[in-house]
Image (spheres, rainbow, N blue to C red):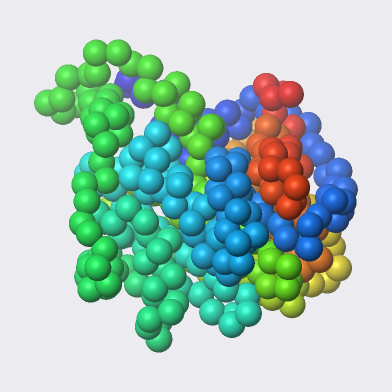
Amino acid sequence: MKNSYSRRDFFKMGVGFGAGALFSGMSLKAGGHKNDGFENGMRIIASGNGIRATEKAMDLLRDGADPLEAVISGVNIVENDPQDHSVGFGGLPNELGVVELDASVMYGPTHNGGAVASLQNIKNPSRVARLVMERTDHALLVGEGALQFALAHGFKKENLLTDEARKIWLKKKEQLTDDDFWFPPKSDNLEDEIRSFVETHGTINCLAINEKGDLAGVTTTSGFFFKIPGRVGDSPIIGAGLYVDNEVGAAGSTGRGEANILNCGSYSVVEFMRQGFGPEEACLRTLKRIAEKSRLQPRLIDEEGKARFQLNFYALNRKGEFGAAAMWSGANFAVHDGKVNKMHPSAYLFKDNNTK
Ligand code: GLY
């Protein structure tokens, strides 16, 4: 059989999954970042692919935009970028070669949210999610219904499958099995190619607090490469990929959506912050719970009993304190604290000996 166990696992389980067996060690060290040097309390934080989003969102906050408009405009940069293969235009497709997008938004002052899932042919699902929140009595629209809703609001249908994404999909299809009429790909370095995409990019989450202390957030993704058509990840699920409570804080996630959906991850992070834990500690406690629950499904753990997937949480509380944590070391996140826009290392549960 051509495909190794690790290769199949890598694609099946998503971001960073295949590297699980290489990891050892564990850290629960948590400190969090205090409100040093913030300007009027404004903060923007985002996943590791979000440094352009945090810059843009802070510019808009300074110009008086509401925090939801700020974070959506920030992630639109990544949704529109054909080089980021995990979000919007250029996102990697499902097993049929069709790009299906998921996104959610949540706005603290009204405790309202909106989301779309399995949306095809619309570049900016985050903008459609905002309209679901603002222009309907619903919280989530999916598939054809979401597309018709977007078209009704003037969005234009576009082909989201870039040539590069199509070639990656074709190679995957060709190397899937020797038991069909497709010859194997000419070069077989697909795993490395995909690994470099998912390790440098990912679903994007972006959270903001403005000078009034109002919070908002957005999460947007093309989901797992080669997913079963119709598969919906955590990004459009309020409470999993995103949760905002103006009285407490906001949280969002990237990584293996299934583990997050089954544990209501972002809701859990906010609830830990409500109990008084700092953002980073709240993320770590949520990851610890998810890692423990994963032990109930042997396929999700390695020989040391550690979760065999990557999952990241990002959190911002109403005081402007922020933090992030990942299941495995090596992740980072973007923060604009009102003065400086830079990357920070995420805390982690398990140490990957291949990362610094
Ligand atoms: N976290 C993105 C997904 O699972 O689709």
Please state if 101 lies on the left or on the right of 258 as rendered: left
Residue lying furthest top: 187
Residue at 32% in and 20% down: 2
- Closest to the observer, 332 or 208: 208
For the question of whether residue 246 can be seen, the reply is yes
Residue lying furthest left: 181
- Closest to the observer, 145 or 289: 145
Residue at 66% in and 52% down: 45
Residue at 39% in and 75% down: 132
- Closest to the observer, 2 or 267: 267
Residue 281 lies in quadrant: bottom right
Q: Is residue 293 above or below residue 344?
A: below
Residue 244 lies in quadrant: bottom right
For the question of whether residue 239 can be seen, the reply is no
Quadrant for the N terminus, please: top left
Quadrant for the C terminus, please: top right
Q: Number of numbered discs present?
A: 0
Q: Is residue 254 above or below residue 137?
A: above
Residue 210 location (% of width, % of height): 69, 66
Residue at 17% in and 19% down: 183
Residue 150 location (% of width, % of height): 28, 68
Residue 336 location (% of width, % of height): 69, 48
Residue lying furthest bottom: 137
Please state if 334 lies on the left or on the right of 35 as rendered: left
Residue 54 location (% of width, % of height): 61, 49
